[in-house]
Image (cartoon, rainbow, N blue to C red):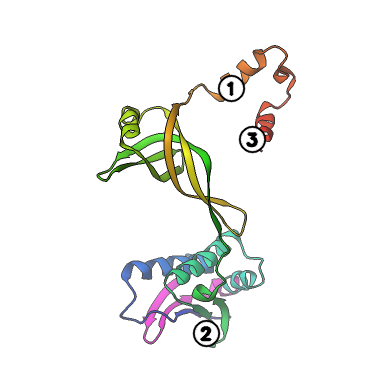
């Protein structure tokens, strides 16, 4: 079994790789190989940047099996994620790389800059709305800019007239609001939609009643049918499409 593995990156040399980027590559390489207690960084050699690690005897078989599983598309989620992150980093650095075993044989290849470019459709501009807590508003040019935060989702690139910004300023770090206007969207190859910009023309303050309270109110409406719904959340998700 291999005692050493080397990640050879063609776009960097020993003296050109930034320290921060070096640590990011080492982190993802360690995640790819696993066995954190038995895999150790060895050195960074000349020529194309070569990040070498050594593996302790007890873990050599397990590391090789982990890498082989990634090669045939059956890797653990952690290893597959590390492979994907390494490939993204290489693409951003305009680089390609190879994972080489102790014998010099190439075990894994990373496409990096050579991987196919994703197909992107758009932009499409349409009526839309975004919502969240207002966490920033202002700007020095003729239009103002805002940022909304909704849990883990942050909506940036929101533009609006100064008059509307002045009306919204009182809601800074306040209740959840909904901005109405036009959004610029792109559709990715995998079907996901990405909001690239939003122009707000008006806003609404949303009701902060808990979802359970809203459902109780719906059930109280005579003839609505909600009182007979066994799973209101499922029905709401179906209505949203």
Disc sitting over residue 20 in the figure: none
Q: CA distance from mark 3 to mark 2?
A: 55 Å
Q: Earlier in the sequence, mark 3 or mark 1?
A: 1
Quadrant that contains the N terminus: bottom right
Residue denoted by label 3: 240
Disc sitting over residue 212 in the figure: 1
Q: Residue at x 55, y 69 (%)?
A: 117
Q: CA distance from mark 3 to mark 1?
A: 17 Å
Q: Earlier in the sequence, mark 3 or mark 2?
A: 2
Q: Residue at x 41, y 39 (%)?
A: 148
Quadrant that contains the C terminus: top right
Q: Quadrant of residue 234?
A: top right
Q: Image check: 211 left or right of 206?
A: right
Which element carries disc 2, helix, strand or loop?
A: loop
Q: Image check: 107 left or right of 27?
A: right
For this rendering, which residue is in front, 47 or 219? 219
For this rendering, which residue is in front, 50 or 161? 161
Q: Earlier in the sequence, mark 2 or mark 1?
A: 2
- Is residue 39 visible in the rendered image? The answer is no
Residue denoted by label 2: 102
Q: Residue at x 68, y 26 (%)?
A: 232
- x and y percent of residue 146 in the render? 36, 40
Where 170 sits versus 142, above or below?
A: above
Where 57 sits versus 137, above or below?
A: below
Residue 47 highlighted magenta (yes or no)? yes
Residue 108 highlighted magenta (yes or no)? no
């Amino acid at each position: 079994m291999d005692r050493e593995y080397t990640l050879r990156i063609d776009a960097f040399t020993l003296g050109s790789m930034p320290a921060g980027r070096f640590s990011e590559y080492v982190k993802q390489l360690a995640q790819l190989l696993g066995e954190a207690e038995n895999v150790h960084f060895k050195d960074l050699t000349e020529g194309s940047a070569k990040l070498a690690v050594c593996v302790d005897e007890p873990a050599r078989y397990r590391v090789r099996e982990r890498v082989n599983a990634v090669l045939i598309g059956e890797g653990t989620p952690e290893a597959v994620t590390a492979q994907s992150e390494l490939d993204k980093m290489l693409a951003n650095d305009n680089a390609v790389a190879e994972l080489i075993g102790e014998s010099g044989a190439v075990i894994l290849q990373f496409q990096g800059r050579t991987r196919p470019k994703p197909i992107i459709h758009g932009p499409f501009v349409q009526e839309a709305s975004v919502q969240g807590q207002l966490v920033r508003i202002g700007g020095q040019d003729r239009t103002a800019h805002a940022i909304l935060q909704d849990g883990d989702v942050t909506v940036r690139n929101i533009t609006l007239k100064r008059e509307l910004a002045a009306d919204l300023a009182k809601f800074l770090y306040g209740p959840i609001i909904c901005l109405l206007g036009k959004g610029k969207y792109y559709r990715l190859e995998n079907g996901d939609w990405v909001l690239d910009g939003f122009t707000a023309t008006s806003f609404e303050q949303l009701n902060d009643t808990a979802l359970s309270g809203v459902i109780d109110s719906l059930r109280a409406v005579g003839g609505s049918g909600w009182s007979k719904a066994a799973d209101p959340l499922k029905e709401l998700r179906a209505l949203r499409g």
